[in-house]
Image: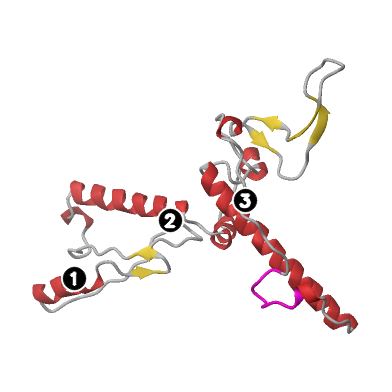
Amino acid sequence: TLDAATGKARYVFVKFKSAADTAQFKKDIAGLKCKGAELDVHDFYGGERNKRSRKARSETEERAALRKQRRMENITLKEMREKAKYEKDKTLIEKSAPLFTYSYAEQLRLKEQFIMHAARNFTREVKAHCDKRQYSFPNWARVHKNKPGCSVHEIIGSPESNLEGYRNKCEFTIGYSDFELNAAFVVAFHGGYGRQGRDCTP
């Protein structure tokens, strides 16, 4: 399986007495998952790499790349933060818009996780403050520790026609829709583009 934090493969070696035992093991383990990642079994022919054909190595690398891609498409906010600890020498766009490499649907999913995490933390902070000051809990904070004390609605994405470009996550611009004096007021995000022209929601 791939380690979500480092992106490196984790593996173990298992030795069997017979080919029949090996075949049975492969059958039993097929479809099993470890921490959400599908387990993959490969034959190992001793310690000499030159005994493995170039085709076999290529297929192994392709499978590893595919597993990593699937893992990245379903990454959680916690795994993303762990992964960031091992990343160095980030570019400016990677620091200012850390989600720009993901699809827009994935960006929204991760943002929704962040908002839910913030709502839960806010509820915990209020409870901790009440405990410290010996205040009674407000009714809205009387929830399970893993639940937010407020309703968190589903994130609404931007229309397909407005996905291109950079949108600031917390600031709006208020101004005229045109340079004409009688133009209507508009509330909107700042727009911009990354180096690759990729739409992003930082």
**Amino acid, disc 1:** Lys
Q: Viewed as shown, does residue 111 lie left or right of 64?
A: right
Residue 71: which disc?
2
Q: Nearer the viewer, residue 6 or 102?
A: 102
The relative height of residue 138 versus residue 168 in the rendered view (above or below) is below
Range drawn in magenta: 141-148
**Amino acid, disc 2:** Arg
Mark 3 → mark 2, Cα distance in angstroms: 23 Å
74 in magenta? no
Q: Tell me the residue at 64%/74% (across/down).
A: 146
Question: Sequence-wise, which precedes: disc 3 or disc 2?
Answer: 2
> Decide: marks 3, 2 in contact (CB < 8 A)?
no
Residue 67 is situated, as x and y percent measured from the top left of the image, at 36, 54
Residue 157 is situated, as x and y percent measured from the top left of the image, at 60, 43
Residue on which disc 1 sits:
27
Mark 1 → mark 3, Cα distance in angstroms: 42 Å
Residue 145 is situated, as x and y percent measured from the top left of the image, at 67, 77
Dividing the picture into quadrants, the one containing residue 147 is: bottom right
The scheme the figure's colours follow is secondary structure
Residue on which disc 3 sits:
155
Q: Tell me the residue at 82%/32% (across/down).
A: 174
